[in-house]
Image (cartoon, grey):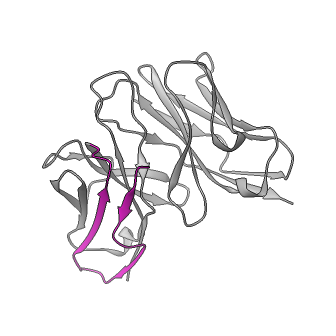
């Protein structure tokens, strides 16, 4: 079974702190994703990566950055946390396909971040 | 551009009655379509997936969905609801053949099941 793990289930930080959210997958997937989930808004894509050291902006990248130094690990960084970044953060991974369909994304359990 | 509209933010049913969660999509190309479920305090789990084969797709836990191109719909159904089906459901679209694997999520439908 694919396993995607996230470093913390719950995190409380103060405004202005630098925050690191870590995600690790064990299935050798090329693609990795960071989403935030807010009530009534569904999941919104922050950043994604299709290879080591590669990254692409999603729909809401402002205030975030990412790092992918190893294939299995994808980190989300909040450079200076703000209260409007209080949310559930979900990491996902999937296989890279040259053609023929989009592969299933597998999700971690999520990190609920509160910024005070 | 891809997008998904889930027509109901909340659906309530009694245990043993049918479930219908509605989803319409917009896609510039042939889409892949998914339904994911999220139980309270859990991560997202894939229920079912349509890529290009049979238009009626069967998933886990007795759920199924039918792809209707003419209506641009992918509604999720189950003949008989169970208490354990109470969760949030997301309809998701992706452009088929997308090498980057981006998914576009609907806003979710919260399903409540009454005893």
Work out whether B21 lies above or below A75: above
Residue furthest front as drawn:
A1
Q: Residue at x 36, y 21 (%)?
A: A100
Q: Is residue B44 magenta?
A: no
Q: Residue at x 16, y 54 (%)?
A: A70
Q: Which residue occupies the foreground of this view, B35 or A14? A: B35
Residue A63 in view: no
Q: Which residue occupies the foreground of this view, A21 or B5? A: A21
Quick one: quadrant of the N terminus of chain B? top left
Q: Residue at x 15, y 45 (%)?
A: A54
Quick one: quadrant of the C terminus of chain B? bottom right
Residue furthest top as drawn:
B70
Q: Which residues are magenta?
A: A1-29
Instruction: Tell how many labels.
Output: 0
Residue B86 in view: yes
Work out whether A37 lies above or below A104: below
> Picture coordinates of residue B50 (x, y %)?
53, 28
> Picture coordinates of residue B83 (x, y %)?
78, 57
Work out whether B51 lies above or below A25: above
């Amino acid at each position: 079974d694919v396993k995607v793990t996230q470093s913390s289930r719950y995190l409380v930080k103060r405004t202005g702190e630098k925050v690191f959210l870590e995600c690790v997958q064990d299935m050798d997937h090329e693609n990795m994703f960071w989403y935030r989930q807010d009530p009534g808004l569904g999941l919104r894509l922050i950043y994604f990566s299709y290879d080591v050291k590669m990254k692409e902006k999603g729909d809401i990248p402002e205030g975030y950055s990412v790092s992918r130094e190893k294939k299995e690990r994808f980190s989300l960084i909040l450079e200076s946390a703000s209260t409007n970044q209080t949310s559930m953060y979900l990491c996902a991974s999937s296989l890279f396909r040259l053609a023929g369909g989009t592969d299933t994304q597998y999700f971690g359990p999520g990190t609920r971040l509160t910024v005070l | 551009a891809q997008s998904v509209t889930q027509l109901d933010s909340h659906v309530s049913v009694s245990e043993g009655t049918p479930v219908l969660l509605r989803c319409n999509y917009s896609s510039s190309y042939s889409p892949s379509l998914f339904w994911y479920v999220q139980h309270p305090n859990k991560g997202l789990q894939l229920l079912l997936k349509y890529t290009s084969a049979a238009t009626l797709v069967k998933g886990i836990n007795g759920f199924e969905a039918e792809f209707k191109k003419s209506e641009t719909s992918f509604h999720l159904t189950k003949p008989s609801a169970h208490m354990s089906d109470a969760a949030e459901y997301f309809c998701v679209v992706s452009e088929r053949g997308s090498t980057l694997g981006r998914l576009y999520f609907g806003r979710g439908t919260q399903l409540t099941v009454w005893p």
